[in-house]
Image (cartoon, helix red, strand yellow):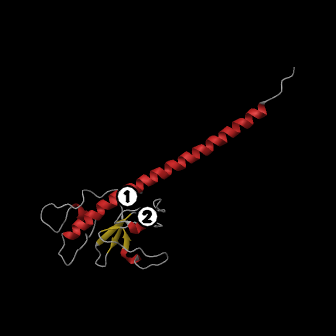
Amino acid sequence: MPRRPSHGFSLLLLLAMVAVIGVVSAGAVSVGHMATRQQAEQELLAIGSEFRAALISYGAGSPATAMLGPVDLQDLLRDPRVPGLRRHLRKVYADPLTGDTQWGLLRGPNGRIIGIYSLAPGTPAKQAGFDNPYAEFEGATAYSQWVFSATPVVRPSRGDPSGADLRSSR
């Protein structure tokens, strides 16, 4: 009896299995990437809270009428206004989204730092459910709109360049 060739069917079945495995793998990578990004955003919120607390502490040590911010982030590590060692922050933390210690600095009219923000590109995955004092982060279209400051910062509306002169990246 002659055998019927089944090579074509086996090849087709093998190609279908490879395609299914590829789709499942791509989905797993996407889910993993999203989980990593959400974890980095949570870390950014925690580190931003540390910077915010340090800016509040630094401002509280200023004359009552001034509430001045630091000239640079190093002033939070060692307050130059007082003799001895006074720390408002243990170290300049790395941005968990960029891995770098470079931060965007929001400066007031006097040139002093009033807030910090991430220089990471992209749109935040977290769009809602922020606790106070970060309720203004809801609906942010860029990480640079997550400004950690001693006082709330009004975010300019899309296309509105007002307030842009206050930002400077370092």
Name of the residue lying farthest toward the right: 1
- Residue at 20 percent across and 60 percent down: it is 87
How many numbered markers are drawn? Answer: 2
Residue 90 percent location from the top left of the image:
24, 56
Q: Are marks 1 and 2 in contact (CB under 8 Å)?
A: yes
- Disc number placed over residue 44 in the picture, else none: 1
The answer to which of marks 1 and 2 sits earlier in the sequence is: 1
> Which one is in front, 106 or 13?
13
Q: Is residue 112 above or below residue 45?
A: below
Q: Is residue 29 above or below residue 96?
A: above
- Residue at 53 percent across and 47 percent down: it is 29
Q: Is residue 7 left or right of residue 151?
A: right
Residue 126 percent location from the top left of the image:
45, 60
Are there few (<14), some (14-19), or many (20+) residues within 10 Å of tag 2? many
Are there few (<14), some (14-19), or many (20+) residues within 10 Å of tag 1? many
Three-letter amino acid code of the residue under disc 2: Tyr
The quadrant of the rendering that contains the C terminus is: bottom left
| Badge 2 element | helix
Residue 99 visible in the picture: no
Q: Is residue 97 left or right of residue 31?
A: left
Residue 106 percent location from the top left of the image:
34, 71
- Disc number placed over residue 150 in the picture, else none: none
Q: Quadrant of residue 131?
A: bottom left
Residue that numbered label 2 is attached to = 143
The quadrant of the rendering that contains the N terminus is: top right
Q: Quadrant of residue 61?
A: bottom left
